[in-house]
Image: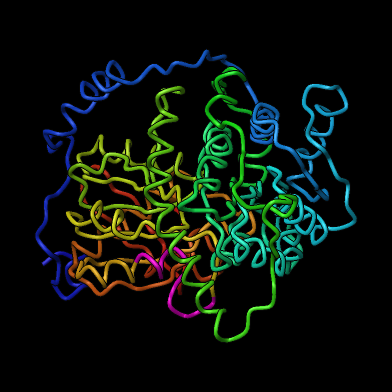
């Protein structure tokens, strides 16, 4: 028995030892398949322009192209550039949106609610504590079934004071009744805003939407982007012609009235129906958008999941690093894949379960704590969906990138190693690990587990931490 086997009492599950010769047939054909997919890809009817933009620039351009009626806003880092850029477009006469400078984020959402209730197409933008200051109004917007849009540039909620990215702001509002869509890239953030009004204004939905993207990582980093021509965008979005609104003299109505016990529950049930309907509406809008843009979207994005044994489920900008890790480990014959959750509300539980059902182990990565003792928001909801579906797969919930902590390709590869070792040793998963946590005990020799095979990599474990390879 080897020293490694002695340490684990010989309980090592006999699975394939990866080598460069053990690639699956899927991997051997992967590049050819991707080439054919690109050839079959819808080109899109819109005229396109190649450019380089930050995420905030891209979303501001999308706002300009949609040309909404009203935008109240109060600046807060890292979303400040959005109202700055939109107000510049207005000052230059490029759009006729009514910009309302307000004294706080609470007032910003209040003004957006009033504008939407009056029949206008409205939006605002914020981050972090700005969203928290809107808290009361978020629930009002959703319960009044107002189809307004909030550009949320994700940033950590204080404390301690931090201006960098995690998802604590939007995840704190996940049960407010708002739709939530998350972007990996600047181009996806641009596309998500263009599609947003088509979803929110659909008569089967009529709920507000948060268009979320990672602060500084996506909002300020410059990337290559392909934009669409303004005529195609406005034709796609269309005119907003609400059936019911406060300024309609032919149909007097009240918005936000007092609802006591005999009526309150019915309003919540109605919101739930709109959220449920949103799944299909989002898919339909994405399919229609593909026809003009050539870009395909859904509730989730699967990356090399066709024969994946080990999968990471993640959201936002770090999907890019995870894809790089998947590609690298695939070179060594390790069957790994990734699922990016694009739409968190409505939660795509059934779709995720279907995509994961062939896996041997799963890592769910959260960029926000919930302090429930039962995992993060994404982890707890996905595990519940798996339980309801009877899907019994070893699953570990990790926390990463809190307060803007870097998440690297190496860390993604280490997470894959961790969940692969669970299968290899037929071990009970240790839950709620922090990725990249600094710890003085991390360098202890007994915390280092070596993996056999040409893909060898170290994972240093200390308490709840998954440590990066040195």
Residue drawn at 51 percent across, 58 percent down: 400
Farthest residue toward the bottom?
261
Farthest residue toward the front?
250
In this view of the protein, which residue sits in the foreground, 421 or 172? Answer: 172
In this view of the protein, which residue sits in the foreground, 89 or 423? Answer: 89
How many numbered marks, from 0 up? 0
Residue drawn at 41 percent across, 70 percent down: 380
In this view of the protein, which residue sits in the foreground, 447 or 465? Answer: 465
Q: Position of residue 257 (x, y in %)?
A: 69, 72
Q: In the displayed structure, would residue 277 be above or below residue 317?
A: below
Residue 11: within the magenta? no
Left or right of 326 in this view: 408? right
- Give the magenta-colored segment's residue range: 371-382
Q: Position of residue 346 (x, y in %)?
A: 44, 58
Residue drawn at 26 percent across, 55 percent down: 451
Q: In the displayed structure, would residue 369 be above or below residue 198?
A: below
In this view of the protein, which residue sits in the foreground, 437 or 378? Answer: 378
Residue drawn at 66 percent across, 46 percent down: 151
Q: Position of residue 74 (x, y in %)?
A: 83, 50
| Quadrant in the picture for the N terminus | bottom left
Residue 379: within the magenta? yes
Left or right of 408 in this view: 335? left
């Amino acid at each position: 028995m080897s020293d490694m086997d002695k340490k684990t009492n010989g309980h090592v599950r006999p699975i394939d030892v990866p080598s460069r010769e053990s690639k699956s047939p899927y991997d051997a054909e992967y590049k050819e398949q991707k080439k054919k997919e690109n050839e079959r890809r819808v080109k899109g009817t819109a005229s396109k322009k190649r450019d380089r933009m930050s995420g905030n620039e891209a979303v501001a351009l999308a706002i300009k192209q949609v040309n909404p009626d009203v935008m109240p806003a109060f600046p807060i880092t890292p979303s400040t550039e959005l109202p700055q850029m939109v107000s510049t477009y207005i000052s230059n006469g490029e759009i006729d949106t009514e910009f309302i400078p307000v004294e706080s984020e609470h007032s910003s959402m209040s003004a957006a609610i009033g504008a939407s209730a009056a029949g206008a197409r409205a939006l605002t933008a914020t981050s972090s504590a700005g969203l928290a200051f809107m808290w009361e109004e978020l629930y009002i917007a959703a319960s009044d079934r107002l189809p307004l849009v909030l550009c949320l540039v994700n940033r950590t909620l204080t404390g301690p004071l931090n201006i960098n990215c995690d998802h604590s702001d939007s995840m704190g509002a996940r049960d407010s009744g708002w739709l939530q869509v998350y972007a990996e890239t600047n181009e996806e953030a641009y596309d998500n805003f263009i599609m947003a009004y088509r979803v929110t204004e659909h008569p089967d939905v009529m709920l507000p939407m948060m268009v979320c993207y990672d602060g500084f990582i996506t909002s300020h980093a410059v990337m290559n982007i392909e934009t669409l021509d303004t005529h195609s965008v406005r034709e796609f979005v269309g005119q907003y012609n609400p059936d019911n609104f406060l300024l309609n003299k032919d149909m007097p109505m009240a918005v936000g009235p007092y609802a006591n016990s005999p009526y309150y529950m019915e309003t919540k049930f109605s919101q739930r129906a709109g959220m449920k309907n949103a799944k299909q509406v989002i898919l339909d809008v994405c399919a229609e958008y593909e026809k003009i843009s050539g870009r395909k979207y859904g509730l989730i994005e699967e990356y090399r999941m066709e024969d994946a044994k080990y999968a990471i489920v993640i959201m936002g900008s770090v999907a890019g690093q995870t894809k790089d890790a998947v590609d690298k480990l695939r070179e060594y014959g390790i069957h790994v894949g990734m699922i990016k959750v694009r739409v968190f509300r409505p939660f795509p539980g059934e779709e995720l379960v279907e995509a994961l059902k062939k896996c041997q182990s799963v890592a769910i990565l959260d960029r926000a704590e919930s302090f429930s003792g039962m995992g993060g928001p994404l982890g707890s909801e996905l595990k519940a969906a798996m339980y309801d579906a009877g899907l019994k797969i070893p699953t570990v919930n990790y926390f990463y990138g809190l307060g803007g902590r870097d998440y690297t390709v190496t860390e993604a590869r280490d997470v894959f190693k961790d969940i692969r070792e669970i299968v290899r040793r037929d071990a009970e998963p240790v839950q709620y690990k922090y990725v990249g946590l600094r710890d003085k005990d991390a360098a202890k020799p007994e915390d280092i587990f070596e993996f056999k095979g040409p893909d060898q990599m170290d994972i240093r474990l200390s308490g709840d931490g998954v440590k990066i390879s040195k």
